[in-house]
Amino acid sequence: MNRGPLLSAGVMLGVGLGGFVDGILLHQLLQWHNMLSSHLPPDTLVNAKVNMFWDGLFHAFTWLMTFSGLVLLWRAGLRTDVPWSSRTFAGCLLGGWGLFNVVEGLIDHQLLGVHHVRTGPSQVAWDVGFLFFGLALLLAGGALIRAGRGDVTPRGGTVRA
Amino acid sequence: MFVIPARRSLESASTIRVTDSGAFLAHSPAMRRLNALTLTSVLLVSSAVFACETCRPAVEAGIFNEHFWGRLAITLLPFGVILAVVTPLHFLGRER
C-alpha cells in the first residue's frame, strides 16, 4: 500500500487553494497587503500596478501548485496500490493550507518582511495569528491523515500489496 | 480622473438620443450607427488612452529594474520550500 501519491496530491492542492485564499481574500478583497507592500507601499498608481504584477506572479505559481496537485490526484486515482481515502485527502487539503501559511508566514512576514498580514500598529499580532492559524490547520490535517490510515481500499479496486 | 471624459461622452450620447429623439431617430439603424461611432470616437481620444501611454513606461520601469531578480527569488522562495517538503512525501508514503 502506498499513500504517498495521495498525500502529495492533497498537500499540493491544499497549498494551491490556501495560496488562493491569501491572494484573493487578503490581497484583493480586503486589500490588507500586496506581495511587496512593505518594500513598495501601494500609495501611488505606479506602485500599486507594480505590486499588482508581483501579485500576479504569486497567483501564477499558486495556480501551478493547484494544477500539479490535480495531475497528481488523477494519477493517484489510476493506481491500484493507492488507498482512496476521503479522510486522508481532506487532511492533506487542510495540512497543505497550513503548510502554505506557515512557510509563507515565516519567510515573507517574519524573515524577509516583504509584507505583513495587516500593516499597522498590530501587525505583529496579525502575523503571529496567521502563523498559529497555519499551525492549527497543520495539526487538524495531521489528525485526519492519521485517522485515514485505516482506509485501505483503492479507487475502484482492491489493494495490491 | 481617467474615467470622467468617457462618462461625459456616455451622458452626452444619451442626451442626444433623448432630445433628438422621437422614436424614429432613436431607434433607426442610422442613428444607432451614429451613436456607436460617436461613442467609439470619444472613447478613443479620451484621456484614458493617453493615461496608459504615460503610465505604462513607469510601471515597466518599476518592474524590470535592478530589483527584479531579487524580487522574483523572494516570490518563488516559499514555493521552493513547499516543493522540498512535498516531494519526499510523494516517494516516502509506502507503508506495510
Image (spheres, coloured by chain):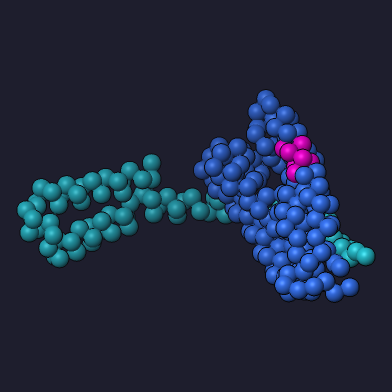
Secondary structure mostly seen in the magenta stretch: helix
Residue extending farthest to the top is: A121
- Name which residue lies at 79% across and 41% down: A135
Is residue B70 visible to the viewer in this orientation of the structure? no
Image location (x, y in percent) of residue B44: 32, 57
- Judging from the image, what is the letter of the chain drawn in cyan? B
Is B56 on the left or on the right of A129, as rendered? left
Image location (x, y in percent) of residue B65: 66, 53
Image location (x, y in percent) of residue A134: 75, 42
Is B68 or B25 nearer to us in this picture? B25
**The N terminus of chain A lies in quadrant:** bottom right
- Name which residue lies at 75% across and 64% down: A84
Q: Quadrant of residue A28?
A: top right
Is A120 or A84 nearer to us in this picture? A84
Please check the rendered image and state whether residue A137 is part of the magenta-colored stretch, yes or no: yes
Is B41 or A150 nearer to us in this picture? A150
Is residue B35 visible to the viewer in this orientation of the structure? yes
Instruction: Tell me where the magenta segment starts and ends, as one range.
Output: A130-138
- Name which residue lies at 80% across and 73% down: A158
Is B12 on the left or on the right of A98, as rendered? left
Please check the rendered image and state whether residue A126 is part of the magenta-colored stretch, yes or no: no
Q: Colour of chain A?
A: blue
**The C terminus of chain A lies in quadrant:** bottom right
- Name which residue lies at 67% across and 60% down: A66
Q: Quadrant of residue A2?
A: bottom right
